[in-house]
Image (cartoon, rainbow, N blue to C red):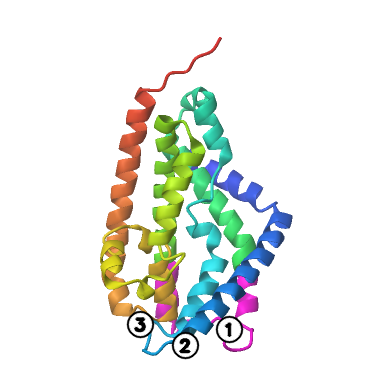
Amino acid sequence: MKAYVSVFRLRLVNGLQYRSAALAGLATQFFWGFILIMVFEAFYSQALVTQPISLPQLITYVWLQQAFLSLIMLWFRDNELFQLITSGNIAYELCRPTGIYGFWYAKLLAQRLASAMLRCFPVILIAAFLPQPYRLSMPVDAVTALLFVITLILGLFIIISISMLIYISTFVTMSAAGSLLMFSVIGEFLAGMIIPVPLMPDWLQAIVNVLPFRLTADFPFRVYSGHISTSEALKIIPLQLLWLTVLVALGKYTMGKALRRVVVQGG
C-alpha cells in the first residue's frame, strides 16, 4: 500500500506543475460552457412543453461538466502506459515488487486529481458570479453538497476502473487509438456528456440506467443541482459501490489473463 500511496503523491505533485496547460484548458472550457448554455437556452425558449430538467439546473449541470472535466472524461489518457504496452517495455513494470493494476490505478488517479485541482476552482468561482441565466447555482443545503462530493469521488473511482479496461484491452488490440475511441465515444454519450440523461428519450434512459457510465458524471451533477433528491441519491450510492466492486474485480481478472499471455521480444 505504501508504494501505491507514494506513486500517487509523486504523480499528483508532478501534475500540479503544468499550470500553463491548465490556463489554456480553462479558456477552452469557458468557451464550450457558454456555447452549450446558449444552445440549451435557445432550445428551452422554443419548447412547447415543460422539460424534465429546469434550465437553471441544466446550466449548473453544464458548468459542473466543465469544472470537473478531468475527473469524468474517458478520453483522458496516459500515453506512457500505452507506450509501455505497445513497445514491449511492459517488462520493466513486471519487475516491480507491486501489483501492476494497483500501481497504474494510483498513477491515473493522481493525474486526474492534479488536472482537476488546477481547473475546477477557477471555473466554479467565476461561474458562480456570472449574470443570469449563465450563473452556476449553489447546492440547496449542506447535505446536498456532501452527497455531491461523495458521489463525485465514487464516480471518479468508477471512471478510472473503466479507463483501466481501456489499457488492458490494448494488450489484445495493440491499438491505443482504437481502444480509446471505442470506449470514449460510447461511454461519454451514455454518461450524459453529450446530451444530459433527463433529455434523452425514455427507451434510451432505460438502457443508460443499467450501465455504470451515468454514475460517473450525470448522477453527481444532478445531485448537486437538486434534480435528484437526497433520498433518491442515498438509494443510488450503493449502486455506485456495486459497480465499482464489479469493475475493479473485472479489471484485475482481465489484467491477470493479459499478463499471462504477454510475450516480450528483444535482446
| Residue on which disc 1 sits | 135
- Of tags 3 and 2, the one toward the viewer is 2
**Residue 218, percent across and down?**
40, 68
Q: Secondary structure at mark 3?
A: loop
Q: Secondary structure at mark 2?
A: helix
User: Which label belongs to residue 52?
Assistant: 3
Q: Is residue 189 visible?
A: yes
Query: Could you tell me how far apart the alpha carbons at marks 1 and 3 are, in whole angstroms?
Result: 20 Å
Instruction: Tell me which amino acid carries mark 2.
Output: Gln
- Circle 2 Cα neighbour tier, 10 Å, few/some/many (<14 / 14–19 / ≥20): few
> Per the image, is 123 magenta?
yes
Q: Is residue 150 visible?
A: no
Looking at the image, which residue is at 32% across and 29% down? Answer: 257
Instruction: Tell me which amino acid carries mark 3.
Output: Pro
- Of tags 1 and 3, the one toward the viewer is 3
N-terminal label among 3 and 2: 2
In this rendering, the answer to whether 136 lies above or below 19 is below
**Residue 30, percent across and down?**
64, 70
- Circle 3 Cα neighbour tier, 10 Å, few/some/many (<14 / 14–19 / ≥20): few
- In the foreground, 89 or 203: 203
Query: Could you tell me how far apart the alpha carbons at marks 1 and 2 are, in whole angstroms?
Result: 21 Å
- Circle 1 Cα neighbour tier, 10 Å, few/some/many (<14 / 14–19 / ≥20): some
Range of the magenta residues?
Answer: 121-149
| Residue on which disc 2 sits | 46
